[in-house]
Amino acid sequence: MSEWHVIGARPLRGSVRVQGSKNAVLPVIAASLLTPNETVLTNCPALSDVDAAVDILRYLGCTAEQREGEVHINTAAPERWDIPPELTHRMRSSVIFLGPMLARFGRARVSLPGGCELGARPIDLHLRALRCLGAEIEELSDGVLCRARELRGAEIPLTLPSVGATENAMIAACAARGETVIYNAAREPEIETLQGYLCLLGADISGAGSPVIRVKGFSPKDHAVLTVPPDRIATATYLCCAVCAGGELELRGVRPRELRPVLSVLRCMGCDLTEGESSLRLRAPERPRPAGAVITRPYPGFPTDAAPLLMAACLRTGGSSVFMENIFDCRFRHAEEMRRLGADISLRGPVAVVNGVERLRGARLRSPDLRGGAALVAAALGAEGETIIEDPGHIPRGYQALEESLRALGAEVWRI
Ligand code: UD1
């Protein structure tokens, strides 16, 4: 358990280089199991989720070394094909190891946590995709057991464009005989990163970024070196922190084109935003305007992960903003905590209405999940006095040294 101490109402000023993407690197670490060749990841963020994924590889008998933003993975001689609960509980998205293990070993046993902080997280689409490729799957009370004597290329129609199911299908299909076509695939930028990595490994795969992905075959190459792209949600986090605290911010090493819907709402709120090829500058307005209606959708729609952060940025606007969550059941658990700061938020099912207030006052809060926790830090930057946020380890899952970066921008934030 750590405590974040934030003294708010200090404008941010300065420049930050944004970390590598958590959601891009996790499936790549899992996919490294596909071949016996070495993988080197650069610009890898130092996150507890990355540690957990690396520990899973080590448990399986691979070697993985993390040093100075690089991870060196050697998957030459894994010895196990199961992941026990101690490891899967540390990383919610450990289901992403199913496809790679099935591809490498022809079998996989993964113990899986039931729900998670965002509500039920079913894996039916992952399992259906693997069954399409010929896997036999037994659903156990505490996980799943998959076997496949041979994976065969197939048509995989996804009923929802699930990011994780698309990733599992892409990875497993690399080991299948014949062509696989994934329909209604997720289009998130992380899918394109995974495709890029699989191509480096020797896969013949195309279509990432569109709803149809084709995997035609796989012939292992020597080794792969991949630079992890910037984290679009961390980018949105810093922008929203600046709106909460006020001030002026430059973000370096980012991809503004991946954040169009977030940038467009921030502009409507009165932010002065300048986009470069790999940089963003934001000047926050004195008092932001409300965001209007923010509806979360799969990419290229407004990202669900950025909604709590934008909600923090709306707390002191001069009017009402409406958030509609379409992806997860329990996305708004931070709202009750924000109310302790004096925020006016009403919730009805998947809809949250935020009526801007003049001022927020520091309080003691508890971080409910990764993005909700970061949103509380952002909200606290706009509150008068001290806010203490108890965090049972959610924030370091997805943010590398957030407190240090904010301090470098002039914020008073300590993690104890
Ligand atoms: C990924 C991201 C997460 C992000 C989410 C949506 C990672 C590690 N996590 O999560 O940060 O918020 O995409 O952009 O990359 N669903 C099913 N059955 C399944 C799988 C999913 O019904 O088998 C549903 C989910 O409950 C949810 C929706 O599909 O309602 C989207 O989930 P999905 O895209 O799979 O999210 P994740 O891959 O878990």
Image: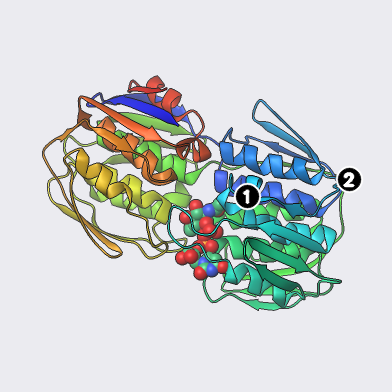
Q: Which of 342 and 26 is in front in this view?
A: 342
Q: How many labels does the image show?
A: 2
Q: In this view, does 243 lie to the left or right of 146?
A: left
**Gap between marks 2 and 1, in whole Å?**
21 Å
Sort mark 1 into few (<14), some (14-19) or many (20+) by Cα contacts within 10 Å. Answer: many
Kindly identify which residue carries mark 2.
77
Colour option used: rainbow
- SS assignment at label 2: loop
Kindly identify which residue carries mark 1.
88
Rendered location of residue 117, percent (x, y)? 44, 52
Q: Quadrant of residue 132?
A: bottom right
In the rendered structure, which amino acid carries the disc numbered 2? Ala
Q: Nearer the viewer, residue 217 or 308?
A: 308
Sequence order check, earlier mark of 2 and 1: 2
Q: Is 111 rendered above or below residue 179?
A: above
In the rendered structure, which amino acid carries the disc numbered 1? Thr
- SS assignment at label 1: helix
Q: Nearer the viewer, residue 356 or 43?
A: 356
